[in-house]
Amino acid sequence: MTEKPIEIAPNDPINASVIWLHGLGADGNDFVPVVKMLNLPHVRFILPHAPYRKVTRNNGYEMRAWYDVYGLTPISREDAIGIKESQLQIEQLIAQEISRGIPTERIVLAGFSQGGAIALHTALRYTEKLAGVLALSTYLPLRDSLATEKTDVNQQTPIFMALGSDDAVISLETCQASLNLLQAQNYRIDWHEYAMEHSLCAQEIEDIKQFLLSILKG
């Protein structure tokens, strides 16, 4: 990853890390206010910036994106190459945290929208045990390859999955199709639905905090 991610950490000793990926067209600064609201002790938050790339759905306009988007329905045609490139970038960030003394079972992958898709995709294929996943207002990309690419070690990794009932970007139908697929493959999904659009709300942030405290306790 060429650009250095934003890092937010308390002054007390760090024993866990959360790698949090922003949505299409945003950057790592997008979730700085949320991280500060969570105010978790002993946890380092890493907020990377997606690279700039031309986005087909937006008439080829260049913006920060974890992968290209072709149509209004995200799973109609997918940018497998871009998704896998971003997967490798996130795995490099995990490796960096390991080198700083954080074991993988104390590392959480989190993301919103496109970032959440990469967090889910990467976590379910990662070869060492992770602490958990935050998949916010998102869906599971490259779903047809999950059965052959998933790793047993993260089969029981807790997944917090949330969506706004009025989301016009990632439809409830799209998100629930991913939820159903994950449940059918026996993943542990902590499902939340909120009366909101394509965003976060106060109750969701509180629920995220409780989820992170539960999986990172001790």
Image (cartoon, rainbow, N blue to C red):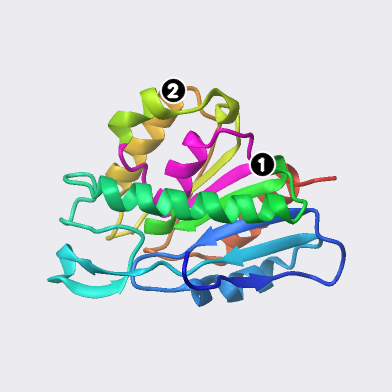
The residue at which mark 2 appears reads as 185
Residue 113 place in picture, x, y as percent: 39, 58
Q: Which mark is residue 29?
A: none
Above or below for 149 versus 62: above
The residue at which mark 1 appears reads as 131
Q: Is 124 colored magenta in this rendering?
A: yes
Judge left or right: residue 116 versus residue 144.
right
Q: Quadrant of residue 63?
A: bottom left
Secondary structure, mark 2, is loop
| Foreground of the two, 186 or 143 | 143
Q: Residues within 10 Å of mark 1 (few under 14, many from 20)?
A: many
Judge left or right: residue 50 versus residue 214.
left
Task: Please give the range of residues in magenta.
Answer: 117-142
Above or below for 130 versus 59: above
Residue 163 can be seen, yes or no: no
Q: Is 157 colored magenta in this rendering?
A: no
Which residue is farthest left? 59
Residue 202 place in picture, x, y as percent: 58, 66
Residue 82 can be seen, yes or no: yes
Q: Residues within 10 Å of mark 2 (few under 14, many from 20)?
A: few
| Foreground of the two, 129 or 74 | 129
Disc number lying in front (2 or 1) = 1
Q: Quadrant of residue 100?
A: bottom right
Residue 11 place in picture, x, y as percent: 84, 72
Above or below for 197 versus 176: below
